[in-house]
Amino acid sequence: MVVQVVREKVFQMMHQELPYAIKLQHTLTRILADNSVRLEYDVLVPHEGARGMLVGSNGRIIGMIGIAARRELEHLWRMRVHLFLQVSVKN
């Protein structure tokens, strides 16, 4: 479900430029003491140019994607979500 939500937000923010080229790799899920969940994902892109487009100036684009995805997940799960997205070039 997380992958679908993040992909949808990438699609919306990137205006169909990049979503089909990315892969999401789950790295961590942890339930925290306050009953919130911490999710960490690597967003893998095919080349450095794609990384720059997805990250944006000062991380603005990936930040907006993460915020939108986190809000939707919180709404769906009715719990606090801490979503961390790390953009990397896949080898």
Image: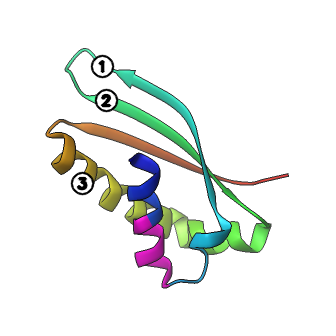
x, y (%) of residue 33? 25, 14
Mark positioned earlier in the residue sequence (1 or 2): 1
Mark positioned earlier in the residue sequence (3 or 1): 1
Give the camera-side residue of 50 and 4.
Answer: 4
Is 69 situated above or below 58? above
Q: Which residue is mark 3?
A: 71
x, y (%) of residue 29? 44, 27
Q: Main secondary structure of the magenta part?
A: helix
Q: How far apart in space, not on screen, are marks 3 and 1 (Cα)?
A: 18 Å
Q: Which residue is mark 2?
A: 37
Q: Residue at x 34, y 56 (%)?
A: 69
From which residue to which does the magenta span run?
8-15
User: Does residue 37 appear to the left or right of 28 in the view shown?
Assistant: left
- In this picture the colour scheme is rainbow
Q: Which residue is mark 1?
A: 32
Amino acid type, label 1: Leu
Q: Residue at x 54, y 42 (%)?
A: 41
